[in-house]
Image: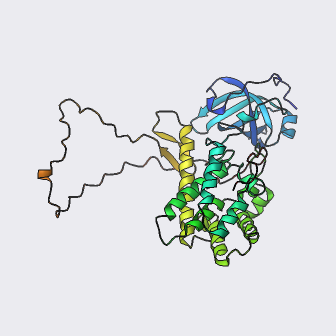
Amino acid sequence: MTDPAADHDPAAKILIADLPEGREVTTYFVAIDVEPATDRNGRSFLRIKLRDASGEVKAIHFDADERVVEQLRSGDVVKASGTYSVHDKYGEQFQIKRLRILEPGEYDIGTLVPVSPVPLDELVGRLRELVASVSSPSLHALLARALDPGREPGATFAVVPAAVRNHHAYRHGLLEHSLIVAEVAGAVAERFSSVNRDLTVAGALLHDIGKVSAYSADPMAPGFTDAGRLHGEIVIGHDIVRGLIEEVPGFPHELAAQLRHIIVSHHGEREKGSPVSPATREAVIVHFCDDMTARLAAVDEIATRTTEGLRWSAWCNMLAGYTYLAPAVDVAAEPAPGHAAPLAPDPEHAPPADVAPQPTPAAVPADDPEPALEPDPALELDPEPADGRDPSGSLF
């Protein structure tokens, strides 16, 4: 199905991150969030988001062929000719002039689906090591069952993204995100004798397990499943963990109750989707490690899309503001002309040990940037899936 004027020759792939501003190009993308609309003058058009392995961009297509409007679906790969621009008010956008749907074999899927920057073998090795460090027999058995890549939910867990956007929104992203949260949470737990490290690590590894069912398994059309919309990933994750616990003979009731509490409280607040707030030490640690590492990943992601040398990023949804990216370096340098080099401390003139040093005046923080009045609210979607799932055999 094509636009009458569409070019049928194969198109070389130009990544969204490399689109030249103001020059017409022809390349291919995944079309998502396809929405027919009508302007104030009654003229119909298509509002689309275009995605590839490097990111996504909003697009608009006026005067589309009626067959395009009728047949185009989210997840279709399209060849588009148009112009990329950056608007002061609307931001990045791609205005489509011609469009057609491509058939499998007309494009390289590797250019369309982003993949974790961490090699899968490294992620799997770190996961094995972390699970092996859990000494509780019941929790170890549960993790070995839950994360086994040879069956569900482990097979999908090893492949899907952790989100549609904002953080770890790429293939193997859920594995990478859950592993990082568990590594950080485990390190924090080791610093407190009152914290059960095994329970913390298990809860951190499984906190997002509901995402294996809450989002579409189609890598080309990420989004909510019916179950995801009806129940949400936290409820689904709780049900999955409860079912897995029942498969481990003699799993202690109290341990089960506290593990399930970590799952249902990991968003931290009811306003953010948690049925309850964290009420145990382990749940508090998992919540804050999850939130912190997700926010840092969002900063890293937006930094990669910011022109080198700029001190401020574009709007960051997860931080609800702009991100300051100027490097904070401390480089040893020759003293400027006319300025003496700093002297090393003189032990003979050091203050007596019983004299408290004078406090240094606190630095005055710089003014905040403009108030954050900005676009889309942070979305914690997720998805993507288990075709091409690779780890074989038992992980543990």
**Percent x, y of residue 14:** 68, 27
In the rendered structure, the answer to whether residue 37 lies left or right of residue 140 reads right
Q: Residue at 64% across / 43% down in the picture?
A: 116
In the figure, 300 relative to 225: above or below? above
**Percent x, y of residue 342:** 20, 40
Q: Residue at 56% across / 42% down in the picture?
A: 302
In the figure, 308 relative to 349: above or below? above
Is residue 194 at all visible to an observer of this figure?
Answer: yes
**Percent x, y of residue 311:** 45, 38
Q: Nearer the viewer, residue 155 or 292?
A: 155
In the rendered structure, the answer to whether residue 1 lies left or right of residue 57 reads right
Q: Residue at 77% across / 48% down in the picture?
A: 386
Q: Quadrant of the C terminus?
A: bottom right
In the figure, 139 relative to 159: above or below? below
Q: Nearer the viewer, residue 347 or 25?
A: 347
**Percent x, y of residue 84:** 65, 30
Q: Quadrant of the N terminus?
A: top right
Q: Quadrant of residue 120?
A: top right
Q: Quadrant of residue 340?
A: top left
